[in-house]
Amino acid sequence: MEYSVQLTFREEWIDARLAYGIVGAPDYNTLPDFVILPAGEQIWMPDTFFMNEKTAQRHTIDKPNVMIRVHKNGTILYSVRISLTLSCPMHLQDYPMDMQRCSIEMGSYAYTTDDIEYVWKRDADMPVQLKAGLAKSLPSFQLVWFNTSDCKSKTSTGVYGCLKATLELKRQFSYYLLQLYIPSTMLVIVSWVSFWLDRSAVPARVTLGVTTLLTMTTQASGINAKLPPVSYTKAIDIWIGACLMFIFGALLEFAFVTYVSSRNFYRTSRMDAKATLVPEATEQPLIISNNHVDARMSEVWIRQQGLDGPVYILANRRQSTCAMIKSFIQRLVIVKYIRNKLYVSDKSKRADLISRLAFPTLFFLFNIAYWWRYYEVEKVRRVGYYVNENGTGAPVNNLLQAQRLA
C-alpha cells in the first residue's frame, strides 16, 4: 500500500570551506548575508535519500525547482521541490472508519553516524510546516496529527542516522455513507417488500429477490475493487455480508413459503379425494369434568359403554412448573394480541407475517451492535498532535480534546 505526497525538502549544514566572511573583519557587515548558487554548481552535499520511497521526481518547469543558498558563515541551505510515492503499511480492519499512520523516512545512504548526524530543526517553527488549510483539504483523508522523531538504521555496513515524520490520517466517512451504507440499507428494505406480496405472485417475488441480491453483490465488488486483497475481515465486509445475508434470507423465505403452500395444496387434494371413501363415524359421548376445576389438573373423561356404563379417566396428571409458566405467558394481553395477529390456518401465510416483524427487528439489532462497536473504537483512538488551520500542531491526549481545540 502506498500514498503520494508533494513537498519542499530542505536541509541545512555547515561547510567552513565556503565561508566568505570573517567575524570581526571590517567588511563583515557590508557583505551580503547569503549568495545563491546555480543548480548545477558542484559543491559537497549530503547523500540524503527517502527510505520508504517507491518512485520520485523533481519538478523542472519552468526551471529546476532547486535552491542552494550559501551564508557568509559557511551555512548552506538546500531546498528542492519533489513528488514522492511512499510505501505505507495500512491496517484495514476498521475500513472505512479507519485511521492510518504513515511516515516519511529519510537518512544518509553512504555516510554513517560517525560522518553525518541528522537532527530536526527546532529553532522557531515546527520542523514540518504544513500548507494552510491542508489538514481539511485532502479528498479522502483528514490530517489529524503529525509528529517528528529521530531514528537509526542498522545494517551490515554500519549504523546510519535517519529522521522520521509520522502522519496520522483519518478517512473521510461521508463518501461511504452516501455511496454504500445508505444504498445497501435501502436494498435490504426493498427485499422485505416480498413479504407483503401474495405468495401466488411468483414472478414478482423472484424478480425482486434476485435483483436486490445481484445489485448488492455488484456494489460490494465495486467497493472491494479499490482495496488490496487482505487476509483479515474488514468492517465493510461485515456490513456487506450482513446485508447479503438478509437479502438472501428473504429469497429463501419465499422458497419456503412456496414449498409449504404447494405441500398444503396437494395434501388438501388428497384428503378431499379420500373423504368419499371414509364411513360416517359413530358418535360417542365425551364428558369433560366441570366440577372441582383446578388449573393444575388436566382430566379427560369418556364413557366406553353407553350412557350408564363406567367412566374411565384417560388423563389425570399434574402440570409441571414450565407448563404453568407457559400457560401464564399465554394469558398475557400482549401475547394474546400478537398471537391473534399472527395466527392463521395457512402456515405459508403465517411465515410471511412472522417475517414482516422478524427481519426488520434483526436488522435493527444488527445496526445497533455494528455502529456501537465502531463508536467505541473511535473513542479510544489516541491522538498525538492536533493540526490547526495554519499548519501548526498542539499536543493533546485524545480526540475529544482535539475537537475542543477546534
Image: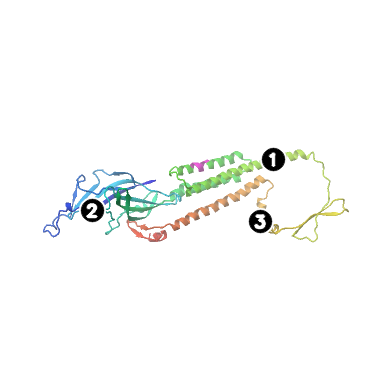
Which residue was labeled with disc 2? 13
Q: Is residue 265 left or right of residue 164?
A: right
* Inter-mark Cα distance, 3 to 2: 83 Å
In this rendering, is residue 56 above or below 335? above
Residue 34: x and y in percent read 18, 53
- Quarter of the rendering occupied by the C terminus: bottom left
Counting every numbered tag in the picture gives: 3
- Viewer-nearest of discs 3 and 2: 2
Residue tagged by mark 1? 265
Mark 2 surroundings: few (<14), some (14-19) or many (≥20) residues within 10 A:
some
Residue type at mark 3?
Val
Residue 367, position in %: x, y? 52, 52
Q: Give the range drawn in magenta.
A: 214-218
* Amino acid of disc 2: Trp
Residue 158 showing in the rendered view: yes
Please say if 263 is above or below 330.
Answer: above
Q: Which dot marks residue 223?
A: none
Question: Residue lying furthest right in this view?
Answer: 308
Which mark is first along the chain, 3 or 1? Answer: 1
C-beta proximity under 8 Å, tags 1 and 3 = no
> Disc 1 versus disc 3: distance between alpha carbons?
30 Å
The residue indicated by pointer 3 is 335
Local SS, label 3: helix
Task: Work out which residue is located at the far front of the displayed protein and give it.
Answer: 156
Q: Which colour scheme is used?
A: rainbow
Q: How far apart are marks 1 and 2 (CA)?
A: 92 Å
Residue in the picture at 67% in, 40% down: 262
**Helix, strand or loop for disc 1:** helix
Crowdedness near tag 3: few (<14), some (14–19) or many (≥20) residues, C-alpha within 10 Å: few
- Where residue 279 sits, quadrant-wise, is top right
- Mark 3 or mark 2: which comes first in sequence? 2
Nearest to N terminus: mark 1 or mark 2: 2
